[in-house]
Image: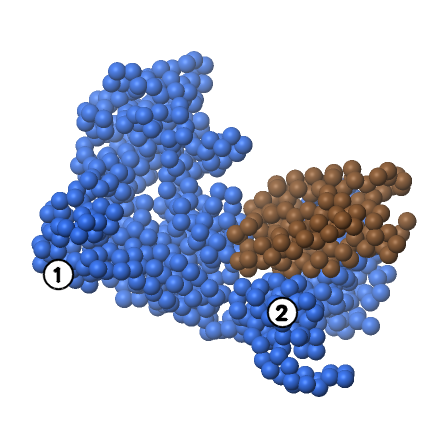
Chain colours: A blue, B brown
């Protein structure tokens, strides 16, 4: 008979408030096998852990059940406690009586009953537990950063500084991301390019950093410490090692009608182009959809003018396969398309622009060379209306936009308003807002400057309609403070559009098996305590991929992610999960069903002499590689003979739980 | 089916995958989004770990409803486990229906780690369905439920 100890945690009043913890501890005493049962205020505290250690020693316990919070919180804590007391760490079961009992039930009697059942089920499972021994696996000392915006660049720089190799994979022809498109940054009004480009140059010059631009991660396999990634480097048709970035080809290219993505499609670019002057790598790329030579075979002008001989029309996609110990997701964001929100007339009117478009219109390298001119007729706008929360903070059920606050819009609108009033004092600026949210260092001061010093007209209320009348845009909305309808004849309307994860995020999340929320932002392992890690081991989160953020927050999170990556890469070995599948040689008939469903290729077959009662023959049997198996259990159900079982979640263990719950 | 025992409370077993649904249940808990205490959760690494045998056993032992929760299709922590679960359980549920265990007593729901509200809503719905269906009397000759 096993000797089991049960430890019921009060968690202050978190559990004790709706569960009679003493009654639970008392009830468990009568369960066969339980030799010790006790409740305590905080089992996870040093005193609580000492209580467990002492009981293990005094009663020579074979296993313990801790009825407390979710195993996702403290399973590791109690395993370590058990191990320190000389018990196998896998002879510990947690009964989740907080998240799945006390916190959701109001009735104390009901809660107590349920807690007893859950604790008894844990005891029943524990009786079928076997001591397990964790193995170790190697760590490949290189990190992969997906996304080369400010988040990816910062993470890569920090990881490289610690002496580890980093690859940045960027889908666009240059790194820099969204920040490269910004004109100025709040709340300091720094020139965005001036603070970003030195980082870009630093990344390109760091010998530990390898920038793979115009590429995407196509496949990832493996697990923490040893991921294998296949990266597709798209054909640029320009040899990166030869191109000097002289841009002569851009001037000579006859096909000049391409949309300039960097300038939000507001002007044209040639078929061969460098996205912007400070691009890294500063190498041209040919748009195959637009290039006359690639489409018709005629032209070839760029090849003729290129003194470096860098043009190669026959270039093909290149596949790079590499191993990594850690992967950082820094896939960033894009502004939503406000066209479906009809009331703003974005699709019909050229003079209704998004904030990112305005950012380009105000930038010296933008389509208007930095002079604020409206897109329709190139005239200087005298009345500008900003509309906040376009597609943000929407009712989830209306599907008109995103339910969340995009966080950065209040501040960048204040920035735009201030910059416009500063440069063009003859221009009136009105801002329609629901709330102005300025929780950040020097943020509220910044917003107040816009209102008090620059006289920006903030109107609390929503806009109902933007309609073209003559060469004006009539903006009709409500002013909730003065309780009246307002109408403004505007020359330019700027929409503070919501931001959403980059469209590539969803497929990357699926590929990495990293969980995402309903808005396609990556989920963190713990919202408060592990904010830069994905629940999937070895995957780290950096920047807006995890949720809306401004530049300072993104940089802070990027460095935090880097420190987690460094912590991982600094290890020579990782302890593997011992809860893996195991095949019973006597029952296995080598049918290969398990191999077919294994997503990791962890199962192989060997010819082996099997000895058992009345059996002695050489058979083909399945063998699980414990270093590769991740413990999903797919094989255990696929196995027709029931030879496969999963350690830690064995058939017997789960059946025991079922029996106990249904009793 | 009429409920003979006025004190009858449904017995519901919920299998939750460790990565999505169990975390979703935890989120429902920390968000204080209540659902009836009749639901008892068993943690499994993946929805594909749920052997049809476990579900049969639950009904045999007196469960009134069994729900399996896993990651959304495409989001499985183990890439494809939930697809296996979906196929296996579709077959099983159809067989159980044939045996007289109504479709309403079995359910599969995809709940992500961020969907605490969905977890709570699903459990409330499921308990309501089971309460309306009443006590499960099928497999009664071999079940061990105390009358």
Which residue is rendered at x = 41% and y = 30% of the image?
A340
> With respect to residue B117, does A158 lie above or below?
below
Nearer-the-camera pick, A513 or B90: B90
Does residue A17 appear in this view?
no
Which residue is rendered at x = 75% and y = 51% of the image?
B96
Mark 1 belongs to which subunit?
A: A
Mark 1–mark 2 distance (CA, rounded to whole Å): 57 Å
Nearer-the-camera pick, A50 or A469: A469
- The quadrant the N terminus of chain A occupies is bottom right
Circle 2 Cα neighbour tier, 10 Å, few/some/many (<14 / 14–19 / ≥20): many
Position of residue B60 measured from the top left corner of the image (x, y, whole percent): 81, 55
Q: Label 1: which residue?
A: A309
Mark 2 belongs to which subunit?
A: A
> With respect to residue A208, does B130 lie above or below?
above
Q: Left or right: where does residue A246 sit relative to residue A431?
A: left
Circle 1 Cα neighbour tier, 10 Å, few/some/many (<14 / 14–19 / ≥20): some
Which residue is rendered at x = 62% and y = 83% of the image?
A608
- The quadrant the C terminus of chain A occupies is bottom right
Dot 2 falls on a residue whose secondary structure is strand
Does residue A502 appear in this view?
yes
**Image disc number at residue A581:** 2
**Image disc number at residue A396:** none
Of marks 1 and 2, which one's residue comes earlier in the chain? Answer: 1
């Amino acid at each position: 008979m096993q000797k089991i100890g049960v430890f019921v945690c009060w968690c202050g009043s978190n559990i004790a408030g709706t569960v009679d913890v003493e009654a639970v501890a008392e009830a468990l005493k009568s369960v066969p096998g339980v030799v010790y049962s006790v409740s305590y205020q905080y089992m996870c505290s040093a005193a609580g852990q000492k209580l467990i250690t002492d009981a293990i020693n005094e009663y020579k316990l074979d296993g313990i059940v801790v009825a407390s919070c979710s195993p996702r919180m403290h399973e590791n804590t109690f395993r370590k406690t058990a191990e320190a007391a000389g018990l196998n760490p896998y002879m510990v079961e947690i009964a989740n009586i907080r998240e799945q009992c006390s916190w959701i039930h109001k009735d104390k009697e009901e809660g107590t009953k349920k807690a007893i059942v859950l604790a008894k089920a844990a005891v029943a499972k524990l009786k079928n537990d076997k001591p397990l021994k964790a193995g170790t696996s190697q760590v490949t000392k290189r990190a992969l950063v997906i996304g080369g915006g400010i988040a990816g660049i910062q993470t890569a720089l920090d990881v490289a500084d610690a002496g580890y190799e980093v690859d940045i994979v960027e889908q666009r022809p240059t790194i820099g991301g969204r920040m490269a498109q910004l004109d100025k940054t709040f709340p300091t009004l720094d020139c965005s390019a001036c603070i970003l480009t030195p980082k870009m140059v630093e990344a390109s010059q760091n010998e530990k950093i390898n920038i793979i631009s115009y590429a995407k991660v196509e496949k990832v396999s493996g697990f923490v410490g040893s991921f294998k990634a296949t990266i597709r480097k798209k054909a640029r048709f320009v040899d990166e090692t030869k191109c000097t970035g002289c841009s002569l080809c851009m001037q000579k290219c006859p096909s000049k009608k391409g949309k300039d993505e960097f300038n939000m499609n507001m002007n044209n670019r040639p078929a061969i182009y460098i996205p912007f002057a400070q691009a890294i790598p500063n190498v041209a790329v040919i748009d195959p959809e637009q290039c006359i030579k690639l489409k018709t075979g005629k032209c070839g002008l760029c090849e003729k003018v290129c003194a470096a001989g860098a043009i190669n029309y026959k270039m093909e996609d290149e596949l790079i396969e590499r191993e990594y110990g850690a992967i950082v997701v820094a896939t960033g964001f894009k502004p939503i398309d406000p066209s479906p929100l009809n009331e703003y007339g974005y699709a019909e009117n050229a003079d209704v622009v998004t904030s990112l478009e305005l950012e380009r219109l105000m930038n010296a390298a933008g389509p208007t060379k930095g002079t604020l001119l409206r897109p329709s007729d190139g005239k200087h706008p005298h009345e500008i209306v900003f509309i906040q929360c376009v597609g943000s903070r929407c009712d989830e059920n209306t599907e008109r936009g995103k339910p969340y606050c995009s966080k950065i819009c209040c501040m960048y609108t204040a920035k735009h308003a201030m910059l416009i009033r500063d440069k063009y004092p003859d221009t009136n600026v009105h801002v329609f807002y629901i709330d102005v949210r300025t929780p950040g260092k020097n943020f509220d001061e910044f917003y107040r400057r816009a209102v008090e010093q620059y006289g920006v007209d903030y109107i609390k209320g929503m806009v109902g309609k933007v309609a073209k009348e003559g060469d004006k845009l009539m903006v009709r909305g409500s002013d909730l403070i003065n309780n009246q309808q307002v109408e403004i004849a505007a020359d330019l309307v700027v929409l503070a559009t919501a931001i959403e994860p980059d469209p590539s995020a969803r497929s990357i999340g699926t590929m990495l098996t990293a969980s995402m929320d309903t808005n396609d932002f990556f989920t963190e392992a713990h919202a408060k305590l592990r904010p830069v890690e994905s629940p999937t081991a070895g995957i780290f989160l950096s920047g807006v991929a995890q949720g809306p953020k401004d530049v300072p927050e993104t940089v802070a999170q990027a460095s935090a992610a880097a420190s987690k990556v460094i912590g991982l890469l600094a290890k020579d070995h990782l302890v593997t999960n011992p809860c893996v599948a195991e095949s019973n040689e006597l029952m296995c008939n080598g049918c290969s069903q398990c191999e077919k469903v294994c997503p990791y290729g962890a199962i192989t077959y060997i010819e082996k002499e099997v000895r058992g009662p009345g059996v002695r023959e050489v058979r083909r049997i399945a063998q699980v590689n414990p270093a590769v198996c991740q413990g999903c259990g797919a094989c255990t159900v696929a196995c027709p003979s029931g030879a496969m079982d999963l350690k830690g979640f064995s058939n017997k263990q789960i059946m025991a739980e079922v029996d106990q719950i249904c009793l | 089916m009429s409920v003979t025992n006025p004190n009858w409370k449904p017995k519901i077993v919920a299998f939750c995958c460790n990565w999505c649904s169990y975390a979703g249940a935890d989120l429902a808990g920390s968000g204080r989004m209540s659902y009836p205490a009749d639901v008892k959760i068993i943690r499994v690494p993946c929805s594909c770990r749920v052997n049809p045998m476990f579900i049969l056993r639950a009904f045999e032992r007196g469960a009134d409803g069994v729900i399996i929760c896993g990651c959304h299709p495409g989001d499985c922590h183990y890439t494809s486990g939930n697809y296996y679960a979906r196929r296996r359980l579709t077959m099983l549920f159809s067989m159980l229906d044939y045996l007289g265990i109504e479709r309403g007593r079995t359910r599969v729901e995809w709940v992500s780690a961020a969907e605490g509200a969905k977890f709570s809503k699903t459990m409330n719905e499921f308990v309501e369905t089971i309460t309306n269906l009443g006590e499960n009397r099928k497999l009664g000759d071999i079940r061990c439920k105390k009358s």
